[in-house]
Image: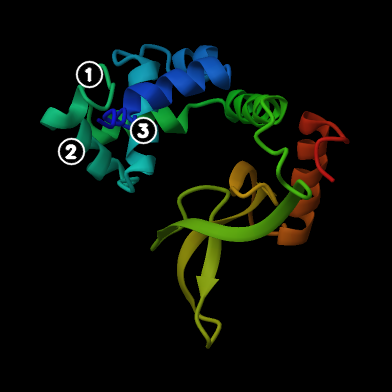
Amino acid sequence: MEEAAEPVKGPTPRRLKKYAAQCLRLKSYLHSPGDGRSQGRIPAAALLWGLIMGVLLRRAAFAAIEALVGSPARRALEVSRSFGDDALSYFTERLDPAVTRRALVMAVHQAKRNKAFDACRFIGLALDGTGAGRSQEAGCAWCRPHRNQKQEIVGFHHQLVMIRVVGTGLTLPLDVEPYGPGDSEYSAGRRLLRRTIGNLGPHFAD
């Protein structure tokens, strides 16, 4: 008589959080992600994990995350309490990006030490321009005009350069560098590359 096969354990929010905290050594970051609020009533850990779950479930819009953490699924997602999109916006506007940068660098270094990239021929870094946050009017110093084919200003948006770890079988976003009016994608890319190499070390990538 054949033995019954053991059930395969699939990914769950709890296992994902445990993996990030223990295997990638991000426990400190998940608890203290660089919260810049002076009097935050909602724990930063709840807001951050809710944001991560929203991105993983492809509900990255803040209103969608509000609906997600306000639903019966919240406990299964390991989010300790519900919150609104305004609280999430206030929280993310005041996050210290340097803390997240350090956490991402730690995670990819730990993944490399865990031999996650050993089957890859090479580890590379790729830069690419992207944009986000379109609006009808300029709202901050980073807003750049968006023009149509007639070179008429039809709105404003933010432009930035992203750097990713590539060649590993996974695409791992690592850092971004915005550039406003009077700046360029080329200059932002050079700043980003220098900072990334300084953070990762010169021997991380091939």
Horizontal relation, residue 54 to residue 32: left or right: left
Location of mark 1 (residue): 81
User: In terms of sequence position, does the residue under pointer 1 or pointer 3 come before the other?
Assistant: 3
Q: Residue at x 53, y 86 (%)?
A: 149
Task: Report the front residue among 152 and 65.
Answer: 65
Q: Amino acid at mark 3?
A: Pro
Disc 3/disc 2 C-alpha distance (Å): 22 Å
Eyeballing the image, is 138 above or below 74? below
Horizontal relation, residue 101 to residue 90: left or right: right
Mark 1, other Cα within 10 Å: few <14 / some 14–19 / many ≥20? some
Eyeballing the image, is 25 above or below 140? above
Q: Amino acid at mark 2?
A: Ala
Q: Which mark is residue 67?
A: 2
Disc 2/disc 1 C-alpha distance (Å): 12 Å
Q: Element at badge 3?
A: loop
User: In terms of sequence position, does the residue under pointer 2 or pointer 1 come before the other?
Assistant: 2
Mark 3, other Cα within 10 Å: few <14 / some 14–19 / many ≥20? few
User: In terms of sequence position, does the residue under pointer 3 or pointer 2 come before the other?
Assistant: 3
Q: Residue at x 30, y 16 (%)?
A: 42
Q: Amino acid at mark 1?
A: Arg
Which quadrant of the rendered structure holds the N terminus? Answer: top left
Q: Which mark is residue 11?
A: 3
Q: Is residue 36 visible?
A: no
